[in-house]
Image: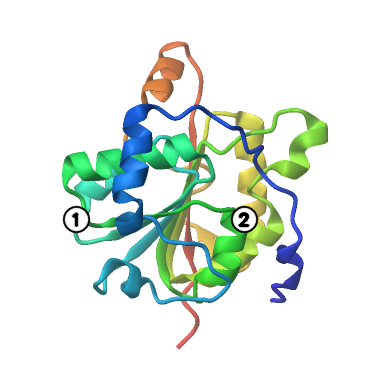
Amino acid sequence: MSEAPAQRHIRSYVLRQGRMSKAQKRALDTHGNTYLIPYAETPCECAQWFGRNAPVVLEIGCGMGETTVQIAQSRPHWDFLAVEVHAPGVGSLLKQIDDNGLSNIRLIQHDAVEVVLHMLPEQSLEGVHIFFPDPWPKKRHHKRRLIQTQFVALLSTRIRAGGYFHCATDWEAYAQQMLVVLGAEPALRNNVQDFAPRPDYRPLTKFERRGIGLGHGVWDLVFRKICPPS
C-alpha cells in the first residue's frame, strides 16, 4: 500500500485553546519529560519508549485520560501509547499517571495520522483503540471523520497479525460508516455479524452511562488483523 497520500490529509479535529487547570499545567511541567514523547518523522521501536518489550496498544484521542488509565491499570503487562492534541487532556492524563504510579503509559501530543505514518513501524502494535471520536454529524463535515478508508488501511499495517482494532461511538450513523469502512479493509476481519458486545476491558465513561440512562445507543466494533497464510 502506498503511504504517501496520507501525508496530506484533512484534520479530524479543530485545535481549541482549552484552558488548562493549575494541576494539569503542573503535571505537564513536572512529568512531561518523563512520559511525553516528542513527535519525530522517524520510526522508533516502542520498546525504547517504555523500556521493555511488551504488547503495545495505540489509543487515538484519549480525551481527559480516565479510560486510558483504567485500561492500563487492568493490563499492567501491556503498554499504552496515547495520542492527544489538546493540552488539557495531556495534562490531565499526566496527572493521573503520577497519581496512580503507572509506568505503562506514554503520550504523544500531535496529529495521530502523522504519528502513525512516521513514528510507528509496521506490525508494532497489538491493538488500536479509538473511542468516541468526533462524529462530525453534518454531512458536509463527514470528510473530517477519523475513520476513513485510507487511514484504516495505514493503521492495519501497524497492527501485528492476530492483533485487534477496536472502535466505539454513540452516533449510529457513524457506527454504520465504521462498519462499512472496517469491513472493506482486506487485512481486517470482523469475528461477529456486525457490532460487538462491549469488551470487559473498556470501562463505561460517565457520559456513556448518562447516555445509556437516556436511552441512547453505543456501538462497539472489534476487528482482528488477519494472519497471513503459512
Tell me the amino acid under the disc marked 1. Pro
The residue depicted at 77 percent of the width and 35 percent of the height is 141
Does 201 sit left or right of 19 as displayed?
left
Q: Is residue 33 above or below residue 138?
A: below
Does 108 sit left or right of 201 as displayed?
right
The residue depicted at 83 percent of the width and 34 percent of the height is 140
Quarter holding residue 209: top left
Quarter holding residue 42: bottom right
Where residue 24 appears, as percent x and y from the top left, is 36, 34
Residue 55 can be seen, yes or no? yes
State how the image is colored: rainbow
Tell me the amino acid under the disc marked 2. Gly
Does 129 sit left or right of 176 as displayed?
left
Q: Nearer the viewer, residue 224 or 50?
A: 50
Say which element carries label 2: helix
The residue depicted at 38 percent of the width and 36 percent of the height is 25
Where residue 184 appears, as percent x and y from the top left, is 67, 59
Quarter holding residue 186: bottom right
- Few, some or many residues within 10 Å of mark 2 (<14, 14–19, 20+): some
> Cα distance, mark 2 to mark 1?
31 Å
On residue 76, which mark appears?
Answer: 1
- Few, some or many residues within 10 Å of mark 1 (<14, 14–19, 20+): some
2 vs 1, front mark: 1
The residue depicted at 34 percent of the width and 68 percent of the height is 49
